[in-house]
Image (spheres, rainbow, N blue to C red):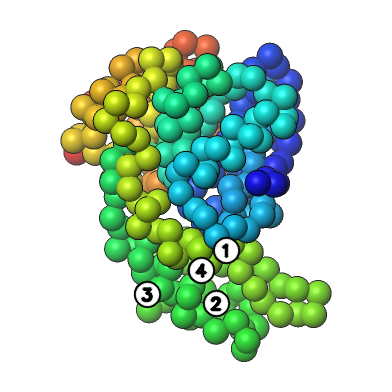
Amino acid sequence: MNLFFRDLGGAGQEPIVLLHGMLGSSRNWQTAGADLAVAGHVLAPDFRNHGRSAATESMNYDDLTADIIAWLDTQGIARTIVIGHSMGGKVAMRLACRHPSRVARLVVVDIAPRDYFWLGHRASFAAMNELNLTDLRSRAEAEMRFEARVPSWPLRKFLTTNLERSAAGDWFWQINLPVLTAALPVLEKNSLLPCDCFDGPVLFLAGEKSNYIEAGDHAAIRRHFPAAKMAVIAASGHNPHMEARAAFVAAVLAFMTGLIEPRARALDERAI
C-alpha cells in the first residue's frame, strides 16, 4: 500500500509518527506536528482510503496496522514514538500490542480500547453519501446541505475538507467514501483482543468536553496498558491537538520527558 505522508520537520534518534482519525488526514496534524518537532523528527502518513494515499477495497485494523509497519520499514524506521487520534489511536494501540519492539512510547488521543457506536458517525456518512456533487458550487454550499443531518458547524466544516475539485471544476470526494461507509461497522469495533497488551510507556489524553473516554474505560485501559498514564486536556472536545493545541503539545512533550504537564490533570480526577 502506497501511503502518502508529510514530513513536519525536526530531528532525533526516535522519530514521532502521527496517525489521524477517521475521515481525517495528515493535514490535521500539520500545526501540532510542527510544534512537536522540537522533540524529534515528525512524520504523518495518510491511512489507505484517506487523504492522498491509495484507495483499496479492503479496510480493517489488520490492513491499517500492516500498512503502517510496511511504511515504517520503507522509511527505515525501526522504533518510533506513536501518537494516534481516534481511529488512529485504535491503530496505534494495536500496533504497540502486536509489534512492541517498534514502539518506544505511545500516546492515544481521545479513544479507548472498546467498541463504539455513534449515531453521529452514521449521520455524517449519510449526509456525505446523499450529497449531489453534480450541481455543487462550493464547500460552503455542501456545509449548508449537511445541516439537516449534522447540526455541528465544526463537524460540517471538517467533513467538507474531504471535498476536492478537479481541473475541470468537478467536485469529488478525496476519501474512498463507498469503502469507508461499508467498513464503518468494522472500524467502530475494538481494535484489540482481550490478550493484547503493551508494557511500555503510554499516555491516554482525553478532551474535557468529550465522552470518548469515560470512567468505565479505565479498567480496560490498564488491563491492556498496565503502565498507562491518563490525563485530561481542559476546554477541549474530541480533537485536543486542534482545539487546545498548546496544552496538548505541552502534555505530550512532558510525557516524553517522564513528566505529566500540570495543566493536563489526571483523568481519574475528572468528574464524569
Q: CA distance from mark 2 to mark 3?
A: 12 Å
Tell me residue 59's x, y (percent). Answer: 49, 53
Is there a contact, CB below 8 Å, between mark 4 and mark 2? no
Q: CA distance from mark 3 to mark 4?
A: 18 Å
Residue identified by numbered label 1:
176
The answer to which of 34 and 135 lies nearer the viewer is: 135
Q: Earlier in the sequence, mark 2 or mark 1?
A: 2
Is there a contact, CB below 8 Å, between mark 2 and mark 3? no
In the rendered image, the vertical position of residue 48 relative to residue 37, given as above or below: below
Is there a contact, CB below 8 Å, between mark 3 and mark 4? no
Identify the residue at image location x=44%, y=74%: 127
Q: Earlier in the sequence, mark 1 or mark 3?
A: 3
Which three-letter amino acid code belongs to the residue tagged 4?
A: Pro
Which three-letter amino acid code belongs to the residue tagged 2?
A: Ala
Identify the residue at image location x=72%, y=30%: 75
| Residue 178 numbered tag | 4
Residue identified by numbered label 2:
142
Q: Earlier in the sequence, mark 2 or mark 3?
A: 2
Is there a contact, CB below 8 Å, between mark 1 and mark 4? yes
Mark 4 vs mark 2, foreground winner is 4
The answer to which of 204 and 270 lies nearer the viewer is: 204
Tell me residue 21's x, y (percent). Answer: 49, 47
- Residue 220, by quadrant, is top left
Identify the residue at image location x=46%, y=80%: 130
Q: CA distance from mark 4 to mark 2?
A: 18 Å
Residue identified by numbered label 3:
149
Q: Residue furthest top?
A: 258
Q: Secondary structure at mark 3?
A: loop
Which three-letter amino acid code belongs to the residue tagged 1?
A: Asn
Left/right placement of residue 35 relative to residue 146 reads: right
